[in-house]
Image: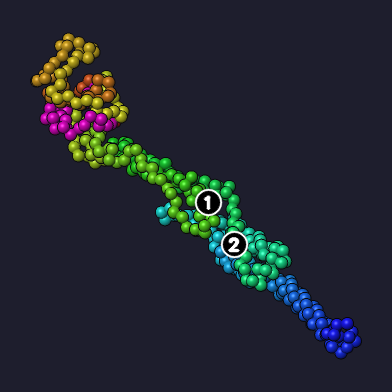
C-alpha cells in the first residue's frame, strides 16, 4: 500500500471532501443569485417599460419637427395643435392693389393631429419588447420624425381661383371719338386686367402646406388698343351753320365758314376721313349733268373749281377745297363738296393729315 495515501476515513480525507463540497455550494449559490438578480433586473425593466414608461414617447421621437421625447400623447397633441395645426388652418389672404380676399382654409383643409401623434407613438411601442428595452436602457434615439399630415380640397381651391378671376378680370376699353350734339368728344380708355389663373392656383397650392398665408396675386394688365393720344385731330362740319371746325383732341383750334351742297346736291352726312391731299390740284370732269359742256380737266390756276388746295374724303366725289367764288361761302351752293376761301384752305391744308376723321352733321 502506498505510504502517502490517506485512509478513506482519515481526518484529512474528510477535510478534503468537505472543502470541495463547500466550493461547489458557493458557486451554485453564486449562479443562483446571479440568475435571481438578472431575472429581477429583467423584471424591473419590464415593469418600468410596461408601467412606468408606458404612455410616453421614446427618446428621439419628433412630430413635424417638434421633439416629443419622453412626453405624453396629450402633451404632444396640444403642442402639435398649437404649433402646426393652428397656423396651417389660418385663412389665406390674397391681395391685388387695395383689394383682398380670404380663402376659408379651415373649411377646405384638415390637419390630422391625432393620426400624427398616434403614428409617432406606435413607432416606439410597436417594437418588440427586447428592442424597446435595448433602446430605453442604452438611451438609443428612436430617430423618428412623423411628417405633417395636411390635406386640402383642390376642387375648392379651383373654385376660389375662378371666383377671384370673375371679380378681377376686366376687358380693356378703347378710347372712342364720338359726336355729342355738334361737339366732338373722346371717351376715356380703360386698362383691363386678367388674373393669371394657372400661376395663382399653383402658388396657392404651394402656400397652403408651407404655412404661407399672404399672397399678392399675379394680375396681368391688358392695355387698350386705342387711347386719347390716337385722336389728336378731327374735322367737324356743321351743315346747319355752314362752318368747319378743326379739333385737336376734343378742343376746337380753328373754325372756318364754308359753302356746302345746294339743294339736290346735299353734302352727305356721316363719319368720313381724309384719304388724300392735293397741292394745286387738277380738276377732272365727273361727267355729270352739271358738268356737261365743261372741259375734260382744268389745271391749276384761276378758274380751277378746286382752288389751290384740296382734301379728298372717302365720301364719293366729296372733298374740302378752296374756291374762287368767295361770295358762295356761308351758303348752300356747291355740288356736294365743302368750299373754303382760298387763303383759308391754304391755312388748313398743312394742319390736316391723311387719315384725319371728318364728321359731317346737320
Residue under pointer 2: 145
Left or right: residue 308 versus residue 69 is left
> What is the secondary structure assignment of the residue under circle 1?
helix
- Locate residue 176, reporting x and y percent: 33, 38
* Quarter of the view holding residue 240: top left
Left or right: residue 11 versus residue 234 is right
Judging depth in this view, the residue of 296 and 49 nearest the camera is: 49
Establish if 168 lies above or below 325: below
Residue at point 61% right, 67% down? 141
Residue at point 23% right, 29% down? 354
Quadrant including the C terminus:
top left
Establish if 139 lies above or below 252: below
Judging depth in this view, the residue of 117 and 101 nearest the camera is: 117
Establish if 278 lies above or below 234: above
Residue under pointer 1: 205
- Locate residue 58, reporting x and y percent: 64, 68
Establish if 93 lies above or below 327: below
* Quarter of the view holding residue 224: top left
Which is closer to the viewer, label 1 or label 2?
2
Give neighbour class at mark 1: few <14, some 14-19, many 20+ (Cα, 10 Å): some
Quadrant including the N terminus:
bottom right
Residue 187 within the segment the image draws in magenta:
no
Highlighted range, magenta: 336-360
Give neighbour class at mark 2: few <14, some 14-19, many 20+ (Cα, 10 Å): some
Residue at point 57% right, 66% down? 66
- Of mark 1 and mark 2, the one earlier in the sequence is 2
Residue 323, can we see it? no
Amino acid at each position: 500500500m502506498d505510504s502517502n495515501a490517506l485512509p478513506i476515513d482519515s481526518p484529512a480525507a474528510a477535510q478534503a471532501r468537505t472543502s470541495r463540497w463547500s466550493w461547489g455550494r458557493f458557486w451554485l449559490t453564486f449562479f443562483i443569485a446571479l440568475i435571481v438578480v438578472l431575472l429581477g433586473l429583467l423584471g424591473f425593466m419590464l415593469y418600468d417599460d410596461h408601467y412606468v414608461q408606458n404612455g410616453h414617447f421614446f427618446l428621439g421621437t419628433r412630430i413635424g419637427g417638434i421633439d416629443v421625447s419622453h412626453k405624453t400623447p396629450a402633451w404632444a397633441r396640444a403642442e402639435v395643435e398649437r404649433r402646426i395645426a393652428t397656423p396651417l388652418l389660418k385663412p389665406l389672404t390674397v391681395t391685388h392693389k387695395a383689394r383682398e380676399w380670404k380663402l376659408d382654409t379651415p373649411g377646405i383643409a384638415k390637419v390630422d393631429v391625432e393620426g400624427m401623434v398616434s403614428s409617432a407613438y406606435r413607432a416606439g411601442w410597436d417594437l418588440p419588447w427586447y428592442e424597446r428595452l435595448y433602446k430605453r436602457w442604452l438611451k438609443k434615439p428612436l430617430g423618428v420624425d412623423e411628417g405633417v399630415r395636411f390635406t386640402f380640397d383642390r376642387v375648392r381651391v379651383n373654385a376660389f381661383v375662378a371666383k377671384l378671376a370673375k371679380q378681377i378680370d376686366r376687358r380693356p376699353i378703347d378710347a372712342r371719338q364720338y359726336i355729342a350734339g355738334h361737339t366732338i368728344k373722346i371717351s376715356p380708355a380703360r386698362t383691363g386686367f386678367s388674373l393669371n389663373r394657372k400661376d395663382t392656383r399653383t402658388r396657392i397650392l404651394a402656400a397652403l402646406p408651407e404655412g404661407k398665408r399672404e399672397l399678392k396675386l399675379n394680375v396681368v394688365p391688358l392695355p387698350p388698343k386705342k387711347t386719347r393720344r390716337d385722336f389728336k385731330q378731327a374735322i367737324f362740319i356743321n351743315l346747319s351753320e355752314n362752318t368747319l371746325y378743326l379739333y385737336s383732341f376734343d378742343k376746337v383750334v380753328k373754325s372756318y365758314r364754308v359753302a356746302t351742297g345746294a339743294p339736290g346736291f346735299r353734302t352727305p352726312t356721316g363719319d368720313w376721313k381724309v384719304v388724300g391731299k392735293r397741292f394745286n390740284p387738277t380738276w377732272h370732269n365727273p361727267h355729270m349733268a352739271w358738268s356737261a359742256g365743261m372741259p375734260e380737266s382744268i389745271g391749276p390756276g384761276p378758274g380751277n373749281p378746286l382752288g389751290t388746295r384740296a382734301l379728298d374724303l372717302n365720301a364719293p366725289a366729296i372733298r374740302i377745297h378752296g374756291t374762287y367764288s368767295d361770295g358762295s361761302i356761308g351758303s348752300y351752293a356747291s355740288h356736294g363738296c365743302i368750299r373754303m376761301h382760298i387763303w383759308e384752305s391754304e391755312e388748313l391744308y398743312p394742319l390736316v393729315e391723311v387719315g384725319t376723321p371728318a364728321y359731317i352733321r346737320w
